[in-house]
Amino acid sequence: MGDRLIAGRYRLEERIGAGGMGVVWRATDKDLGRVVALKRSQAGDSGQIRREARIGAGLHHPNVVTVFDAVIDGDDRWLVMEYLASRSLAEILETDGPLPTGKVAKIGVQLGAALAAMHDKGMVHRDLKPGNVLVAEDGTAKLTDLGIAQWSEVTRTGGGLDGGTPGYVAPEMAEGQQAGAAADVFSLGATLFAAVEGTSVWGDANAGPFVQLRRAAAYNLEPMREAGPLAPVLTELLRRKAAGRPSAERAARLLAEFADVDALVRPRRSRVPKRAIAIGAGAAVLALVAGLIYVVKEPASMAAPPPAAPAGSVGDPRTADPCALLDPSVLKQFGTPELDTANGNFNACGILLRMSPDDGDIVDVRLELTFPKSPLLEKPVPGRLIVREVPGLPEEKCERVIPLPDGNQIWVHAKHIQDWHAHLCDYVDPVAVHAAAMLNREPIKRRPAPFPAGTLGTLDACVLGGSLMPGIVDGPAAPDPVFGNWECYWNHREMEVTIRFERAWAPFEDEGRRVALGSREAFVEVSSEWEACQAEIPHRTFTGDGRAMIETVEIYVSDKVKPPQEMCPAAERLAGEIAPRLPPL
């Protein structure tokens, strides 16, 4: 079989798995020289492979197996996926028996992060079980098999048994209802229950699927005997009523208390301001270790006595200075770099790299202080911080993160303003490596001066909008802050509201429909990028780095069911209530 090529490109090496939905092979991509996993549907060129490819293409997360492509070879359609040297959780349990609670919690945090990313995009997995969880030797867990996943708004005929495995199915699915995000959370709990107890929550599979389904419909749970400290968390995940279960994000946070990992923060949609120069691009200068990690060794010339405060710590996020981690000279071999301190959100700083004298090619490399987007498998060690590659990105993007001991992280990313196809990481890596070397020596420095009176940098987005949400969101919605509270989210069911502060080059481009707000004005338009209605309030102009700049308040209102244009009345109303609360011009 080693000589067989699929689609003239992928050489099959070894059959590594099989199930009711398909057969999986380890293969070599001859074009790119990398190892991949190929999955062929048992039904040939079926809709299952096409559906899995479509769902996978819309989801990039470090705890979900990445889908690269779908190809046709003869009468068969093959799914090309990331290869992970691992065993399924089902294989581990069959070979090694039940796992310690700490290890189970560590797996659960990662799966919770994966589900949170899916649910944030309106997807449900519908078949989370030990057989669909891959676990590598280093403890990395990844969710796989999206073949019966679906977008949550899809209406299907038939009952809940269209998806799911009887031993891990939620009670509402056993009763014939459709699977939603809460059903995935139940299946997460059932999977972790099996990992720690050694049996399905609905009893021994040898009794047969119909026995398990009857127990699920009757909510006849197996008792917990080995769960120990995990028992209260599993009880929450396994509640009978879907409305009583925590979200996947909340589940990950609960599980993180029993695992040596950091809890996730719900993934955010990154956005480039319309008026700001596009975020720049970069390429690699260091040796890649295990495909994912760059080890940063500090030069002897940068050595310094141990600081009094822990190295790599952020401290007060409102006064931490991201610009202190940047040195434009690390990019001088590529062009003319200059520090850009006044663009973007207040947690960010950048380097503008002019590639040509006529400013025809400009790259903006941006460094941001953020929360992690996924759980960390290992606690970062002060003084030995590493730069990590963000996997699963398309070739035209480059991102690096530096996890910090205090639970925060540094995010370095870039994009060329002209979509110029450079080696994108050439500019990102020197910036990230320098930042890591600085962090290994000392904590992040404080801003040289406080934000001046009247600037949005002195405001808290969660406080600004918190008391207004009951009139906008139909139901309770707790604030969900982003680093420094210069951006905040509120969620309730399908609805989401975002308030964020932005800085960009002046003059303000008055796109959208103008709305008078007393002494102020706002501009309302549908944002296709965020699938939301956006209201933007110009606040004040100022001079930054010798340029005319402007601060704005951005408001986004979206709903997973309703079209964005229907959210514009709510966005406009919220803008009208926020405008009088802003500092006077």
Image (cartoon, rainbow, N blue to C red):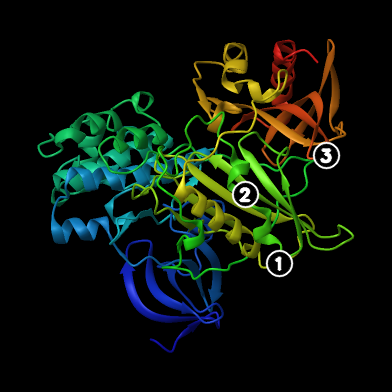
Residue 101, above or below 79: above
Crowding at dot 2, Cα within 10 Å, few <14 / some 14-19 / many 20+, comes out as: many
Tell me whether circle 1 and circle 2 mark residues in contact (CB < 8 Å). no
Furthest toward the left, the residue is 225
Mark 3: which amino acid?
Gly
Pointer 3: what residue?
Answer: 546
Label 2 amino acid? Answer: Leu
Q: Residue at x 46, y 44 (%)?
A: 442
Q: Residue at x 45, y 53 (%)?
A: 62
In percent of width and height, residue 118 lies at: 48, 44
- Label 3 near label 2: C-beta < 8 Å? no
Left or right: 539 as drawn, with respect to 167: right
Q: Position of residue 458 (x, y in %)?
A: 64, 21
Q: Which label belongs to residue 326?
A: 2
Q: What residue is shown at x 58% (from left), y 47% (from top)?
A: 325
Mark yes or no: residue 208 visible: yes
Residue that carries the numbered disc 1 in the rendered image: 333
